[in-house]
Amino acid sequence: MPFGDHRTETRTLLGAQLVFNIGFYAVVPFLAGAMSTEYGLDAAAIGLVLGARTFSQQGMFLLGGMLADRWGARRAILTGCLVRIVGYATLAAASDFSLFLLGAVLTGAGGALFSPALEARLSHADQPAGTGAPSRGRGRRRSVFVWLAITGEIGAVLGPVLGSILLGWGLDAALSLGIGVFAAVTVLLWYLLPAGPDRLPPDHGGAVPAAAPAAAGSRWACLRDRRFVLFCALAGMNMLAYHQLYFAVPVELSRRGLDGAWLGALFLLASVLTLLLQLPVSAAGQRMGPGRALAAGFVLEAGAFTGAAVTSMHPGAPDGSLVPLLGVVAVLILGHMLLTPTILSLIPSFVPAQGPSSGRGAYYGLVATCGGVAVLTGNAVLGRLLDLTEQHQWWPGTPWMPLVLLALLAAAALPVVLRGHGTARSADPSPSTAPSGRAR
């Protein structure tokens, strides 16, 4: 199998991510339409429900990571599955706004418990099958987070297909599928995930024994590490950039007078590129080293936004073409593919070598929470700029320029942050396991 040199536990977690995404994307993309057509909720109520789901997940990632450190990753992963089952059951039982809101919050909270714990556990499990040490003699082994991106994307493609088939029977049918998927994941992980405590990889010199639950002080250590907080703030620009597929790109479609159905083609392009190119792009990132890979990824994203700004047009302009947006999305996704595995694989290098090894959950949670804050504030500013540009007839590319500048800032600053941290690449052939040579 393509990632057969990873441990059985790693393959189990990757499979869980695949199925978890199928269950999520079979329901959530169709939630707004169903609340409107089947239950008659107005736009304000629907927006609040969807916003609450996003905020409860992104805003609670740090808390979810801390709970993973306190409980252990296995217990947090299983609890996240159970909470999402309760959330979907609440949505299935909902007939008014209050229950939809509660179900959405529970759905987001389940993800906030599941994802940081899974990523932290993967970072421990990222070593060859049947050995206790990283692979160093067989060339550069792909980071487990490359496979996490691919399996997650497969779920993001298959989920809407299944959801659209089931939606003919109503939202409850899609929710029932989601409940069944998460229940199956819970049972399988209960039996397949080792019940023992998380351990650090042996490349820490074996000085750290099996992890005990993190002490209260260690759970807050990620916030006291100024270098890591700065790393999180800059890395969060990647999530802000990616989420423009959901916000600014649809606005550009509307400006060009193109039907909203073309958005599906752009998402399909993003998924196809990820599935086809994630492996070679990640291999290129490994050869560059983490600092250069981060810089190149953000430069690509800045280039995508520059292209969007240059080709942007005022609403109602004639001869709107989809071709520029195809190029924008392609370059943006290339940058995202380079950045995402690099960022995730770098996180364990910030975790102190001494002390409880289970403290990674909070570190992964903080990165995700910073990304969520970046999306919330960045989209608010971008939305305001879009309104002002239309009101005052400014240059139509104006709203894109802050995104260009933020991406360039991250490209310039992140290598500097890493330079003093000892994460610059040397000749280490195992970027996915050695803290000194991570390539997310």
Image (spheres, rainbow, N blue to C red):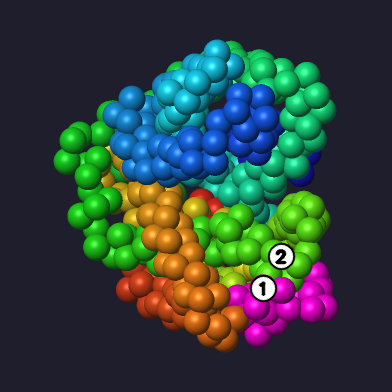
Vertical comparison of 341 with 119: above or below: below
Q: Quadrant of the C terminus?
A: bottom right
Q: Quadrant of the N terminus?
A: top right
Q: Residue 253 has which mark?
A: 2
Nearer mark to the viewer, of 2 and 1: 1
Who's the residue at 52% across and 71% down the image? 386
Residue 335 picture location, percent across and down: 62, 68
User: Amino acid under label 1?
Assistant: Pro
Residue 130 seen anywhere in this rendered image of the structure? no
Say which quarter of the image contains residue 59. Answer: top left
Q: How far apart are labels 2 and 1 at the CA level?
A: 9 Å
Cβ–Cβ under 8 Å for marks 2 and 1: no
Report if residue 145 lies within the magenta region: no
Provide the residue span drawn in magenta. 304-329
**Earlier-in-chain disc, 2 versus 1:** 2
Residue 110 picture location, percent across and down: 47, 28
User: Amino acid under label 2?
Assistant: Leu
Seen in the image, is 310 located left or right of residue 84? Answer: right
Vertical comparison of 233 with 2: above or below: below
Most extreme residue toward the left is 217
Who's the residue at 39% across and 60% down the image? 377
Q: Residue 315 has which mark?
A: 1
